[in-house]
Amino acid sequence: MSHKFIELHLGSHVIVHGFDAQNKEITESVEAKEFTKKLVALSRIKSVSENFILTDYTYGRLIYWEYKGDYNTIKKLLTT
């Protein structure tokens, strides 16, 4: 079984650790000084918007990543 990856330039992000008793997200914001190249497994990408890529993370957490580039470029990379 081979894993397929995409190279992205990712920056600041918000980690969703879960939900509190009132069903409000428990989040942690991480501010990055610059964007960093990362290889992300395609299977971890949940959605893409014009501002963020949502990926899953360990222990059931989610991460909203800022990305460098434009939506159409990312869309093309994901659909080819």
Image (spheres, rainbow, N blue to C red):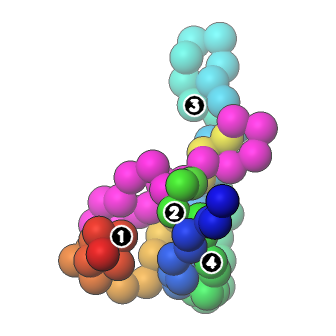
Q: Residue tagged by mark 1?
A: 78
Mark 1 vs mark 3, CA separation in Å:
28 Å
Q: Looking at the image, is mark 3 or mark 4 nearer the viewer?
A: 4
In the depicted view, which residue is nearer to us: 60 or 19?
60
Q: Is residue 18 left or right of residue 78?
A: right
Q: Residue tagged by mark 3?
A: 25
Residue occupying image coordinates x 69% and y 36%: 60
Q: What stretch is highlighted in magenta?
A: 45-60
Does label 1 or label 3 sit earlier along the sequence?
A: 3
Mark 2 vs mark 3, CA separation in Å:
25 Å
Give, as a three-letter code, the residue at label 4: Leu
Which class describes the residues within 10 Å of circle 3: few (<14), some (14-19), or many (20+)? few
Q: Is residue 12 visible from the viewing direction of this image?
A: no
Mark 4 vs mark 2, CA separation in Å:
9 Å
- CB contact under 8 Å: marks 1 and 3: no
Give, as a three-letter code, the residue at label 3: Glu
Q: Is-magenta flag for residue 75?
A: no
Give, as a three-letter code, the residue at label 1: Leu
The quarter holding residue 80 reads bottom left
Q: Residue tagged by mark 4?
A: 39
